[in-house]
Image: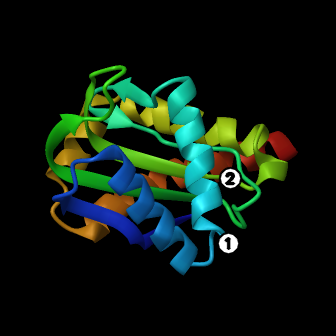
Amino acid sequence: MIEKNLIYLNSKLANRDEIIRKMSEDAKDNGMINDVDEYIAAVLKREAEVPTTVGFNVSIPHGKSQAVITPFITFMKTEKPFVWDEVSEEETQLIFMIGVPIDQKDTLHLRILAQISRKLMDESFRESLLRADTVEEAYQLIKSIENNIYSEEKGNAK
């Protein structure tokens, strides 16, 4: 779900749509989605409904789309905070983009959002992400989210 090559640190990008496009194209290059434009349209539709800024300089763009082949989370830390959208005027610097196959959209989608939100409530986790200098450091931090999702799945299967 989380791949090292889908983690971007100190990105100079500072525009919501450019970031969503970059992350989507790379997800396609990694075989996680099959149609970049369809996926982006779904993400932007969700953004139009309610911006995905969640406070703490964090945004979690996501959308429901047939284009998603396999669940994924991409992560970007920008060089500096920027305004995510004109509607909320909230700044963001940590971006988690989620892709979930349409047939898993209700269960897995909600579990991923819940786990990310839970981790982001922890100030030390956020600070660690902001301080991460290497992809490996960021990967290990974010991997804990994925581990919690799978632990939760195993617990529900009993």
Toward the viewer: 143 or 14? 14
Q: Is residue 116 above or below residue 122?
A: below
Instruction: Give the residue displayed 71% in from the left and 51% down from the top.
Output: 65
Determine which quarter of the picture holds residue 156.
top right
Instruction: Give the residue displayed 36% in from the left and 64% down from the top.
Output: 7
Indicate which disc, 2 or 1, sits on the residue closer to the N terminus: 1
* Residue 5 relative to residue 155: left or right: left
Scheme of image coloration: rainbow
Amino acid under label 2?
Answer: Val
Question: In the rendered structure, are the residues bearing label 2 and label 1 in contact, judged by CB atoms less than 8 Å apart?
Answer: no
Q: Helix or strand or loop: what does disc 2 sit on?
A: loop
The residue identified by callout 1 is 34
Q: Give me the disc on residue 60.
A: none
Q: Nearer the viewer, mark 2 or mark 1?
A: 1
Give the mark count: 2
Q: Position of residue 135 (x, y in %)?
A: 28, 68
* Residue 120 relative to residue 102: left or right: left
Instruction: Give the residue displayed 39% in from the left and 29% down from the top.
Output: 53
Q: Decide: few, some or many residues near mark 2? Use Cα within 10 Å; few <14, some 14-19, many ≥20.
A: many
Q: Is residue 146 above or below residue 117?
A: below
Spatial CA span between label 2 and label 1 = 12 Å
The residue identified by callout 2 is 100
Rendered-image quadrant of the C terminus = top right
